[in-house]
Structure formats: C-alpha cells, structure tokens
Image (cartoon, helix red, strand yellow):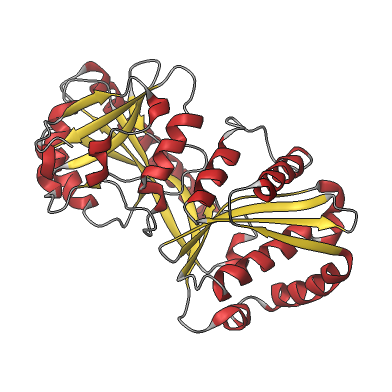
C-alpha cells in the first residue's frame, strides 16, 4: 500500500477487479455495521451493477487524511454517487482523523469549474455531513439539497427478543402473523440459507423463480442479487429465506444482510398466485424472528421507500437526501442554480395559491 496518497479524481480502468487495495483504509471493515461502505459491497457493485455507458471513479479529497468518494462518471460527463437501486445508504468515507471541513474544501477544488455533481442516498443526519457542506461552500460550490427516499428502520431493545418485538407491533399485524404462521406450519416449509454451496445455489434459483412470478418490476441488473448473496454468504452475512409449498415449489423468497449486529432486508418477493396465503408476511415474520433471536440483531432496516407495509414492521423513518454540487462560476453550475431558484419560486407560488383557496373555502 502506498504510504502517501495524492488527492484527485482517479478512474478505475478495470472495475471488475474491484476497488484498489489502498482504498481499504477508508472502507468499513468486514463485519462492521455499515455494510454499504464495505469492500464486499463496492466490489460486487463494480462487478455486477454498473449502468451502461458509465465509468467508475474514485475521488480522493484531501489525500491520506481526507475523504474517499466512490463515484460514477455518466455518459454525459457528470459525476454522481456510485449507488444502485439496492443501496440503502451512501456516504463520503473519511480516513481516521479526517477533518470533514477541510475534506469538503478539497472536494470543492476537485469539482470546481465542472458540471454539477450529484451525491445521493445520503443520511440527512450523518455525522460530519454539515462540516463537509461547510467546506464545500467555503471552496465556492453551492450544495443544493433534494429529498431522495425514506428509509424505515428500528433499533431493537436489548434482551426483548422476538416476543418483545412482536408485542410492540400493531394488533392487526400481530394477529395476522400468529394466524398465518400456524397455517404455514401445516401447508409449507421454510428454508434458511447462510453458507456457500449447492443448497445456496438452489436457493438463489428459487429466489429468481419467485421474482419472475411476482409483481416486481423488471430488474436492471438481474445478476446482482445472486452475486451479492454468494459473497455475503462467504463472509457469513447472508440470510436467504425461501418459503415453499409441500410440493417444493417456492412461494416467497427474501434475503437479508446481517453485519455488525445490523440486519437489513434487501429484497423480497412472493408469487402473485399465492397471495391469499400471505407467503410474504409469513416469510418476513420467520426471517425477522431469526435475526432477532438467533443473530441478536441490534436494529432492523426495511430498506428503500415508503411502502405501506413497512411502518407495521418497524417504527422509525429517516430521510435519505441528495446534493447537487454546483459551481456558480461555470455555465452548467449557474444553470442548475437558476433552475433551483425557479423551482423554489414555483413551489412558493403553489403554496400561496393553495392557502388562498382554503381562505375562500
């Protein structure tokens, strides 16, 4: 590993080989709580989930004691976060002892004069984010914030176990879970897969078969799920659940990643024809019980979006945001700022019209 690192925007000529070794000092270690900042995650994304026409770039702002940002350069030259439709969080990765304000200033130097860069899937409450933004502003860039998606999650009370967790759920969900689990015990069988091998390969095929017969939209990266399950299993982080009927046909499948005590539900699907038996609810209950009682998870994360079922299972919502980093001294940056101002003015006008309508009503 090189002892001294120079800041810059560094393209990755062979993304299938993963991130360079020197990035390890910035990445979350294997088994840490932030799975989406680990080498396992990024190397899988680079190998199986790069959009056509994009090129991965590593931005190093501030050198050895700065911040690493895994990015994509899109076909039109714009820079954006290296994220996927499966990413639950993305963040700048600081080295030990990094000063976030200085890292923001260094990032501003790298982006100055170019087209606006888009950083999204950010935790609005992430430590150091405000300092990073202060540094960006000090460098002359203007960070334009936008709302990205909601993330539903819940910390778990130590020692409460599955029964304690279930007792805190809405009464209708509790009743459904108890009734459906009793029926499922008579009419289906549950498989939990954790380790590499033939059983996992059969489980991946079952997951893909369920997805093909579900309500799920077209998958932009159909090989990604299987690839991630294999590497997560090799690291001991995978929990793949499959619910089958008594003839062995898969009815529902979902997979979680458990790392550093944090249990994240990444993907789930059920066969539409089996909806009456609620196989998705049954499987979610079985999987949640397992990560709570067996894995002793400290938190549950139900992923991207504000789907109606999520507040039934977990109680807290946090906002993922995006930032458009615009340089007002460049034509593209000035145009982005003008559009933002126009959009803000339009929103204010619509709010004024709505208030006027209410007064008239």
The quadrant of the image that shows the N terminus is top left
| Image position, residue 297 (x, y; %) | 49, 70
Quick check: 302 above or below 186? above
Q: Please identify the quarter of the rendering in which residue 34 is found.
A: bottom left
Q: Residue at coordinates 56% horizontally, 46% vertically from top-left?
A: 229
Q: Is residue 177 left or right of residue 260?
A: right
Across and down, in percent, residue 197 comes to: 63, 47
Q: Is residue 83 visible?
A: no
| Residue 236, visible in the rendered structure | yes
Q: Residue at x 68, y 68 (%)?
A: 285
Quadrant of the image occupied by residue 78? top left
Toward the viewer: 336 or 227?
Answer: 227
- Give the percent coordinates (x, y) of residue 290: 61, 69
**Residue shown at 42% from the left, 44% from the top:** 40
Left or right: residue 312 compared with residue 140: right
Task: Give the quadrant of the C terminus.
Answer: bottom right
Quarter-of-image position of residue 74 = top left
Residue with the most extreme front position: 197
Instruction: Give the x, y percent position of residue 239.
Output: 59, 57
How many numbered discs, if any?
0
Of 116 and 360, nearer the camera is: 116
Query: Going by the image, does 138 lie left or right of 311?
Result: left
Q: State the residue at coordinates (81%, 63%).
A: 189
The one nearer the camera, 2 or 98, is 2
Residue 191, compared with residue 109, is above or below; it is below
In the rendered view, tell whether residue 54 sits above or below residue 267: above
Return the residue nearer the eye: 26 or 183.
26
């Amino acid at each position: 590993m090189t002892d001294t690192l120079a800041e810059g925007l560094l393209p990755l000529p062979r993304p299938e080989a993963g991130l360079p070794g020197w990035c390890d000092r910035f990445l979350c270690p294997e088994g840490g709580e932030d799975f989406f900042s680990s080498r396992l995650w990024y190397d899988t994304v680079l190998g199986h989930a790069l959009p056509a026409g994009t090129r991965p770039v590593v931005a190093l702002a501030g050198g050895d004691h700065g911040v690493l940002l895994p990015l994509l350069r899109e076909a039109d030259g714009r820079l954006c976060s290296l994220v996927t439709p499966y990413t639950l969080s993305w963040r700048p990765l600081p080295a030990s002892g990094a000063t976030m304000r200085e890292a923001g200033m260094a990032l501003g130097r790298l982006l100055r004069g170019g087209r606006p860069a888009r950083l999204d899937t950010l935790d609005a409450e992430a430590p150091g984010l405000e300092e990073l933004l202060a540094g960006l502003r000090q460098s002359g860039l203007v960070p334009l914030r936008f709302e990205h998606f909601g993330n539903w999650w819940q910390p778990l009370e130590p020692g409460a176990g599955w029964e304690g967790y279930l007792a805190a759920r809405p009464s209708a969900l509790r009743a459904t879970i108890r009734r459906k689990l009793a029926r499922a015990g008579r009419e289906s069988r549950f498989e939990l897969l954790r380790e590499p091998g033939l059983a996992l390969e059969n489980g991946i095929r079952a997951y893909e078969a369920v997805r093909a017969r579900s309500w799920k939209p077209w998958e932009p990266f159909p090989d990604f799920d299987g690839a991630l399950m294999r590497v997560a299993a090799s690291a001991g982080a995978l929990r793949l659940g499959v619910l089958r009927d008594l003839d062995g046909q898969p009815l529902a499948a979902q997979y979680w990643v458990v790392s550093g005590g944090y249990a994240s539900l990444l993907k789930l699907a059920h066969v539409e024809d089996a909806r009456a038996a609620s196989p998705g609810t049954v499987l979610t209950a079985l999987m949640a019980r397992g990560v709570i009682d067996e894995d002793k998870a400290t938190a549950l994360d139900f992923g991207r979006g504000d789907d109606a079922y999520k507040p039934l299972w977990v109680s807290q919502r946090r906002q993922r945001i995006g930032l458009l980093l615009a340089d007002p001294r460049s034509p593209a940056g000035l145009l982005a700022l003008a559009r933002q101002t126009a959009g803000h003015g339009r929103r204010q006008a619509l709010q004024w019209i709505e208030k006027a309508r209410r007064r008239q009503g």
